[in-house]
């Protein structure tokens, strides 16, 4: 197998040799002989290395651990206790598949990235599957119980072209081709070709430009579809006891197994184009997954290809609600973490009638250690919005421009969808179905954030547009007055200015979903300003007006979409948060996965009564934010998510006091001195 | 609906921390003010209006170095209960952080050379999240050591891998 692969290297080397030797004026026969010699050498070296590597590599599976001894010069002995194994991933590229081989990667899921995963390369397909089952404590018969969670439908390929790559892919491909030809010494050919193409475009723009655009689109679409087919062909998502198995790949097959113990939630990932088409992708939030880019085909967190939103929602809720935290008794540590803090001695914490009740956790969550004021009726979970969090107060919401009223089921901008009707597979328990639909409802229609969040974003957009307008105006005035002698040079720079604005707006679309979206508008704006400057050189003052207007329009759209997409909710087991204008991310984070809180209040947020609540967790990105939520609502949400943890630090005021003191304060207590720290029970020596 | 707010954590940094922070600010601000004055003296023809401007800038820098630590001292607070570590930091952007005891993975104390002069230490509490550690800065070093011991003992007493 290595021989086959090394042939590719040999071919490349032959090319290089040809290029080198033709310059040396040797007879053709000599060139061929040299190439053949080099090829034989390379293949022999590769085969020798691999034989040596295979002879020095030994692995064994004992009842306690998996051991691997490897290394030709540096000997390594690695052992993984079998109960630490969290993932067993199989991967076979086309060459390996021809030979019936597979690479097995065994992960412990703890510090992905610190040390390479233990890889067995190669095993036969049968051995690999046997090893996978053995490592994951699984009998031969334990296939998925209810049939696959999801299976590829080729109709999903219609969403494949809806990515940035479709529009930039052709250019990237051309650049790669150009580079390749260049390295083969064919630069003259490509340069001449490019020049002829350019002349053709200039002489017949009406014919050439549409034709080129069409070719561009066709190549982009075809490329995206091919990529989709290769990555997601034979896609199949299975639930095995305690884990989820993902199989995909047309040429290179991949099999990823994720232990549900590592799962801390799911994410609905909706970039703008997919969102407009009513599609979404599902990603996992799990501990110990390597971080990769969103568009990467090897993204280990990706659970599905782009697929219809209702299906995505169904898969997301099914994966999230069936995780073992529900079906298996939680480890004792977790229960302790969420056991309510005894609230004795702290008046003002006793649940008053006016307080939002703790969100009732399902009975298996707390095992009887729930606070006394828990909502008594478990079946309430299924039949209504959660008190205090699902139903927004009408005066808080106000009519958002472009999004009238509250998005209830079916009235969502993403198109009509009835998540409740996407029934759970087969014989799922009634409770699970109820929980699932509850989560689905929260994912689709979370509570909107206050109007102040929209105001903040609009102000930010206006400020960015204003800055751009002032810059443009300043440049116009300066050039008119002849104060800028180098302005002439900008005529030539006009072209590069065009690409500058392109880069600027791509940056904006990539990052615009973050809170710093405003500043990216600014960055795009700076790019835009170059156009303005170049245009003046060319005598088009119109552009100096158009650019700030475009920046303003884009900024306002970002503001409105960003504010409309903000949302949060609490389902029985998950904290749901949604954000993002360009890429909308709806995250359902397991409430047991919350490992702490950060509340941030900038100067401007404080003035508009907003707060950003960040739940820190060991999984995924490490922290998930509820952005620009009303101060009081945000704190109540956090307090309800992890009952007991925050209560000692919160103060609640009656509504009548609200107007007089916005920021409730209690006297900070006695000044600290090293031996009177409350709560710090230092043992006597 | 009642209005919910966060109460400030109970404890402040050690009073000696104010001097330490002042030294830190001065190390940043004094060269800045000095550079401005030097540039004015060396590279300009010393017009009066610019002189006034530079003087205001330099005095502003020094005033900031004196005032900012005192404001920090009022703002930055911390608290350790049986169940959580709770801190508040930030002058303009307020930031409250809560880490439950059961999720703490590591407790470090650190003492820089200048800190040692003032008898101070920092306690850093790390959880499994990549969102960053919580640092309680400017504690008296005996207190910091006791606190770290206490936190370590409590954390070890809590089973689980804290993820």
Image: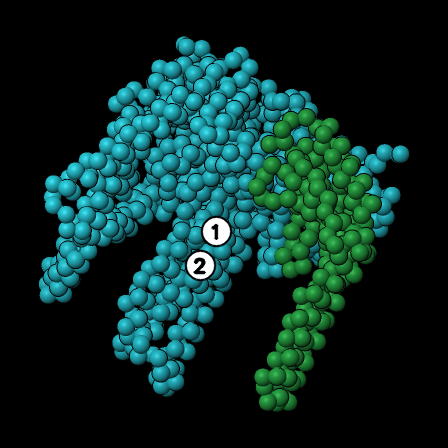
Chain colours: A cyan, B green
Structural crowding at the residue carrying mark 1, measured as other residues with C-alpha within 10 Å and reported as few (<14), some (14–19) or many (≥20): some
Please report, as a chain letter, where disc 2 is located: A
Task: Quickly name the residue at label 2.
Answer: A520
Please provide percent x and percent y for residue A666: 77, 50
Compared to A28, does A63 lie above or below?
Answer: above
Q: Secondary structure at mark 2?
A: helix
The CA span between labels 2 and 1 is 9 Å
Q: Please identify the residue farthest to the right as the structure is shown.
A: A685
Residue appearing at x 39%, y 85% in the figure: A483
Query: Is A320 above or below relative to A648?
Result: above
Image quarter of residue A596:
top right
According to the image, label 1 marks what residue?
Answer: A514
Q: Residue A230, position in %: x, y? A: 28, 33
* SS category of the residue bearing label 1: loop
Residue B113 visible:
yes
Q: Residue at x 42, y 69 (%)?
A: A468
Q: Is residue A636 visible?
A: no
Which residue is rendered at x = 46% and y = 18% of the image? A59
Residue A536's place in the image compared with A336, above or below, is: below
Q: Are marks 2 and 1 in contact (CB under 8 Å)?
A: yes
- Neighbour class for label 2 at 10 Å: few (<14), some, many (≥20)? many
The label on residue A282 is: none
Task: Provide residue B7's location: percent of width, then percent of height.
Answer: 73, 48
Q: Tell which of A568 and A486 is nearer to you.
A: A486
Quadrant location, the N terminus of chain A: top left
Label 2 and label 1 in one chain: yes
Side of A304 where A284 appears, left or right: right
- In the displayed structure image, the side of residue A545 where residue A605 appears, left or right: right
């Amino acid at each position: 197998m290595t021989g086959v692969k090394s042939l590719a290297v040999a071919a490349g080397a032959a090319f290089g040799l040809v290029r080198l030797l033709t310059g040396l004026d040797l007879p053709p026969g000599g060139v061929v002989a040299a190439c053949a010699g080099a090829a034989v050498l390379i293949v022999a070296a590769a085969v020798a290395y691999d034989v040596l590597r295979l002879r020095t590599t030994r692995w064994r599976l004992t009842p306690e651990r998996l051991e691997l001894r490897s290394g030709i010069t540096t000997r390594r002995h690695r052992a993984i206790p079998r109960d630490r194994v969290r993932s067993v991933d199989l991967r076979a590229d086309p060459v390996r598949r021809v030979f019936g081989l597979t690479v097995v990667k065994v992960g412990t899921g703890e510090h992905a990235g610190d040390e390479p995963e233990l890889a067995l390369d190669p095993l036969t397909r049968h051995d690999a599957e046997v090893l996978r089952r053995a490592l994951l404590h699984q009998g031969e018969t334990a296939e998925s119980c209810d049939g696959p969670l999801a299976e590829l439908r080729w109709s999903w390929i219609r969403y494949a072209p809806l990515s940035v790559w479709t529009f930039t892919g052709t250019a990237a491909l051309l650049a790669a081709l150009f580079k390749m030809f260049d390295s083969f010494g064919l630069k003259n050919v490509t340069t001449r070709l490019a020049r002829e193409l350019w002349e053709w475009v200039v002489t017949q723009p009406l014919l050439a430009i549409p034709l080129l655009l069409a070719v561009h689109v066709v190549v982009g679409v075809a490329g995206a579809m091919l990529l989709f087919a290769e990555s997601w062909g034979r896609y199949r998502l299975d639930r095995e006891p305690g884990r989820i198995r993902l199989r995909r790949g047309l040429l290179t097959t991949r099999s990823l197994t994720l232990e549900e113990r590592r799962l801390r939630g799911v994410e609905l990932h909706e970039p703008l184009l997919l969102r407009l088409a009513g599609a979404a992708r599902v990603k996992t939030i799990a501990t110990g997954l390597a971080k990769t880019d969103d568009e990467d085909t090897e993204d280990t967190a990706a659970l599905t290809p782009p697929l219809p939103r209702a299906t995505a929602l169904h898969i997301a809720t099914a994966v999230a609600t069936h995780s073992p935290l529900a079906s298996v008794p939680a480890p004792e540590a977790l229960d302790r973490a969420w056991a309510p803090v005894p609230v004795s001695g702290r008046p003002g914490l006793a649940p008053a009638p006016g307080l939002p009740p703790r969100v009732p956790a399902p009975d298996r969550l707390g095992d009887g250690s729930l606070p006394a004021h828990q909502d008594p009726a478990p079946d309430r979970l299924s039949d209504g919005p959660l008190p205090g969090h699902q139903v927004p107060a009408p005066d808080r919401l106000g009519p958002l421009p472009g999004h009238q009223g509250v998005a209830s089921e079916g009235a969502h901008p993403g198109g009509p969808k009835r998540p409740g009707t996407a029934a759970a597979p087969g014989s799922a328990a009634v409770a699970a179905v109820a929980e699932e639909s509850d989560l689905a409802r929260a994912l689709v229609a979370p509570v909107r954030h206050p109007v102040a969040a929209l105001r903040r974003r609009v102000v930010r957009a206006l400020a960015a547009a204003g800055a751009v307008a002032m810059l443009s105006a300043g440049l116009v005035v300066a050039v008119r007055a002849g104060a800028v002698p180098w302005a002439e040079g900008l005529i030539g720079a006009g072209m590069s200015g065009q690409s500058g604005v392109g880069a600027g707006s791509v940056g904006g679309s990539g990052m615009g979903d973050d809170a710093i979206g405003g500043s990216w508008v600014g960055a795009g704006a700076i790019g835009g300003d170059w156009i303005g400057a170049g245009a003046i050189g060319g005598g088009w003052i119109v552009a100096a007006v158009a650019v700030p207007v475009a920046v303003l329009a884009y900024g306002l759209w970002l503001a409105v979409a960003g504010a409309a997409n903000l949302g949060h909710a609490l389902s029985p087991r998950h904290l749901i948060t949604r954000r993002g204008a360009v890429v909308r991310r709806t995250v359902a984070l397991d409430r047991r996965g919350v490992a702490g809180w950060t509340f941030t209040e900038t100067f401007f947020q404080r003035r508009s009564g907003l707060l950003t609540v960040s739940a820190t967790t060991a999984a995924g990105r490490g922290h998930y934010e509820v952005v620009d939520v009303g101060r009081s609502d945000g704190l109540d949400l956090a307090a309800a998510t992890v009952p007991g943890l925050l209560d000692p630090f919160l103060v609640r005021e009656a509504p009548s006091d609200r107007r007089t003191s916005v920021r409730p304060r209690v006297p900070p207590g006695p000044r600290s001195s090293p031996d009177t720290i409350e709560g710090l029970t230092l043992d006597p020596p | 609906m009642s209005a919910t707010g966060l109460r400030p954590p109970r404890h402040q940094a050690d009073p000696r921390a104010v001097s330490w922070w002042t030294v830190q600010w001065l190390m940043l601000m004094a060269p800045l003010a000095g550079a401005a004055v030097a540039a004015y003296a060396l590279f300009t023809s010393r017009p009066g209006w610019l002189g006034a401007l530079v003087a205001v800038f330099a005095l502003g820098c020094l005033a900031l170095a004196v005032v900012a630590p005192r404001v920090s001292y009022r703002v930055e607070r911390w608290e350790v209960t049986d169940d959580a570590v709770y801190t508040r930091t930030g002058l303009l952007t307020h930031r409250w952080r809560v880490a439950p005891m059961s999720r703490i993975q590591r407790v470090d104390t650190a003492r820089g050379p200048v800190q040692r002069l003032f008898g101070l230490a920092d306690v850093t509490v790390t959880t499994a999240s990549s969102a960053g550690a919580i640092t309680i800065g400017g504690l008296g070093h005996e207190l910091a050591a006791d606190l770290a011991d206490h936190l370590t003992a409590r954390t070890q007493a809590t089973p689980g891998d804290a993820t």
